[in-house]
Image (cartoon, rainbow, N blue to C red):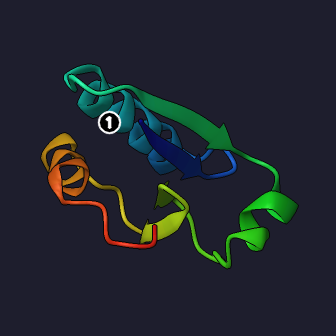
Amino acid sequence: MRKIHVLGTGCPKCNQLEMNVRVAASSRSEQVIVSKVTEIKEILEFGVRITPALVLDGKVVSRGKLLDVNEITALLDAPIAEGD
């Protein structure tokens, strides 16, 4: 099971990133849990100061960029590193 957090306060790019993540996740054979984090305090706890940001399995993999569905799919296809 993969866990994705989309970090963003509700700007258009943040909302689009969430939609792109949900599209990428829907085509997976494995279970993917997607959650949206909108509270600034929670976003800062991830060490993120610019949104939108994407956290995959607890690791910040993108910040300040609107990833498209293909980029998100590539991140999901990458093997999970040891110790993660």
Q: What amino acid is at disc 1?
A: Asn
Residues packed near mark 1 inside 10 Å, few (<14), some (14 to 19) or many (20 plus): many
Q: Residue at x 28, y 27 (%)?
A: 30
Q: Which quadrant of the rendered structure holds the N terminus?
A: top left
Q: Position of residue 51 (x, y in %)?
A: 56, 64
Q: Nearer the viewer, residue 21 or 29?
A: 29
Q: Secondary structure at mark 1?
A: helix
Q: Is residue 5 above or below residue 29?
A: below
Q: Nearer the viewer, residue 42 or 17?
A: 42
Q: Residue at x 46, y 37 (%)?
A: 18
The total number of labels drawn is: 1
Which of the 4 image quarters holds residue 83? bottom left
Which of the 4 image quarters holds residue 41? bottom right
Q: Nearer the viewer, residue 23 or 52?
A: 23
Residue where numbered disc 1 is placed: 20
Determine the residue located farthest toward the right in the rendered image. 41
Q: Residue at x 36, y 37 (%)?
A: 21
Left or right: where 49 falls relative to 64:
right
Left or right: where 58 falls relative to 45:
left
Q: Position of residue 29 (x, y in %)?
A: 21, 22
Which of the 4 image quarters holds residue 10? top right
Q: Residue at x 78, y 70 (%)?
A: 45
Q: Position of residue 54 (x, y in %)?
A: 47, 58
Left or right: where 82 falls relative to 60:
left
Q: Is residue 54 above or below residue 12?
A: below
Q: Position of residue 58 (x, y in %)?
A: 55, 61
